[in-house]
Structures are given as structure tokens and as C-alpha cells.
Image (tube, grey):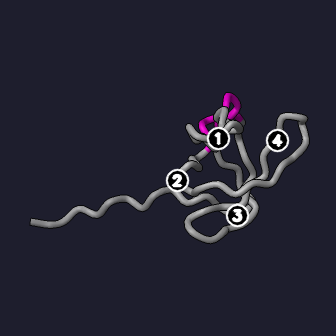
Amino acid sequence: MARTRKPKPWQPTIGGLAHYASRYSGLSRGCPVRVLAEAIGGRMRVEIIGHAGHPVRITVKTSYLFPMPPSLFDGMP
């Protein structure tokens, strides 16, 4: 009987966009973030738009970052 391998979890790319969703954070309203760098302990340094509309840099767990959902304009010529 052959073993099936688990697919590798999605890894955000540095400089790319990701969807941040954490049930514990006040900034978590399912917002897009820009991934800036890898941090220690399974975390990533990201930039997010704060409450005053200014960019804020925070460190979040990689497990709370997901691929961006499809956009309305994806696939258009």
C-alpha cells in the first residue's frame, strides 16, 4: 500500500500579497497584507493598512496567512 503525502501548506512569497485572517487580532478583518520578510518562529513580517489609513508593519503567524481570493478581474484579457 502506497503512502499518500500531505500537500505542503501554502507559503507566502516575500514581496507578494496575502490574505490575513486571525480570530484573535483586532486588525484581522480579512484584509490583504504585503509580505515584507520572514521572521523567527513561523512568523512573517507584513505591512497592513491601520485604522488611521497609514501603513503599519506587524509580525503575524504564517498559519494566519492565506492565498489571496480570486479577484473580479482575474482572467480578463
Q: Residue 49 carries which label?
A: 4
For residue 4, side relative to residue 43 (left or right): left
Position of residue 39 relative to residue 55, above or below, is below
Question: Which mark, residue 63?
Answer: 2
Return the residue nearer the eye: 65 or 41: 41
Which badge, 1 or 4, comes first in the chain's sequence? 1
Q: Residue 25 carries which label?
A: 1
User: Magenta segment: does it hold 72?
Assistant: yes
What residue did someone put label 3 on?
Answer: 14
Disc 4: CA contacts within 10 A as few (<14), some (14-19) or many (>=20):
some
Q: Earlier in the sequence, mark 2 or mark 3?
A: 3
Amino acid beneath label 2: Ser
Query: Which range of residues does the magenta coloring cover?
Result: 68-76
- Depth-wise, is mark 3 or mark 4 nearer the camera? 4
Is tag 3's residue or tag 4's residue first in the polypeptide sequence? Answer: 3
Q: Say above or below: 77 vs 59.
A: above
User: Comparing marks 3 and 1, which lies closer to the viewer?
Assistant: 1
Mark 1 vs mark 4, CA separation in Å:
14 Å
